[in-house]
Amino acid sequence: MSYFSLKSFRNVRPERAVINEVVTLTRELIESFDPGVIAIRGLSKYQRTSTILQSMRKVLEREALAQNVPCIEITLKQIIATFCIDEKATKREAFRQLAHIYPELVHYLNRPNHWQNEYYNNLFMAASVGAVLLRTQNRKYFLH
């Protein structure tokens, strides 16, 4: 079984409070779902300049390692390569192809409001990271 989720961490609090929230959430998710692997979206060039994102990622990886759960990075380039075989290779086309594979996602494409499209872009990104992992990793991660 696959699980994907979105969680926003507001950076209006001290960095330590945000990091503590990441630690708590990571521990709860590992305890609840007992994953064989955790897929993490690779940070963009712009995102890599953020110290808070770097810290959040390191703490997530550290917590996963402490529980013997490997973390696998899935980049946007991998997502596009996985879903854009004969079509125009863009993130938008990758999401369209993902919705073709998983029809329950279709109604989240092309929403009428910009903020809805931004929100669902994050949903598609999370789902595509998991879908790429499912397509590329050894099945042993998914058998318990």
Image: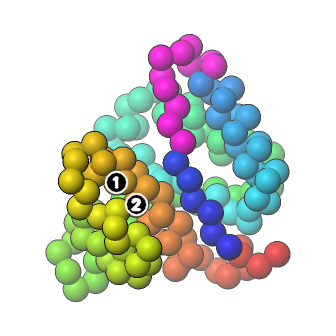
- Compared with 2, 61 (above or below) is above
For the residues labelled 1 and 2, the Cα–Cα distance comes to: 5 Å
Residue 95 relative to residue 71: left or right: left
Closer-to-camera residue (3/69)? 3
| Label 1: element kind | helix
Q: What is the crowding at mark 2: few (fewer than 14 residues within 10 Å), some, or many (at least 20)?
A: many
Residue 133 in which image quadrant: bottom right
Q: Is residue 101 magenta?
A: no
Which residue is depicted at the point 17% across and 75% down? Answer: 88
Which residue is depicted at the point 37% across and 38% down? Answer: 47
Q: Mark 1 highlights which residue?
A: 121
Residue sticking out furthest to the bottom: 86
- Whether tag 1 and tag 2 are in contact, CB under 8 A, the answer is yes
Please give the label number shown on residue 106: none
Residue 101 in which image quadrant: bottom left
Q: In the rendered image, is residue 82 in sight?
A: no
| Label 2: element kind | helix
Q: Mark 2 highlights which residue?
A: 124
Amino acid type at mark 2: Phe
Which part of the image, by quadrant, shows the C terminus?
Answer: bottom right
- Compared with 63, 97 (above or below) is below
The segment highlighted magenta reads 7-17
Q: Is residue 12 magenta?
A: yes
Q: Position of residue 119 (x, y in %)?
A: 36, 47
Which residue is depicted at the point 61% across and 38% down? Answer: 58
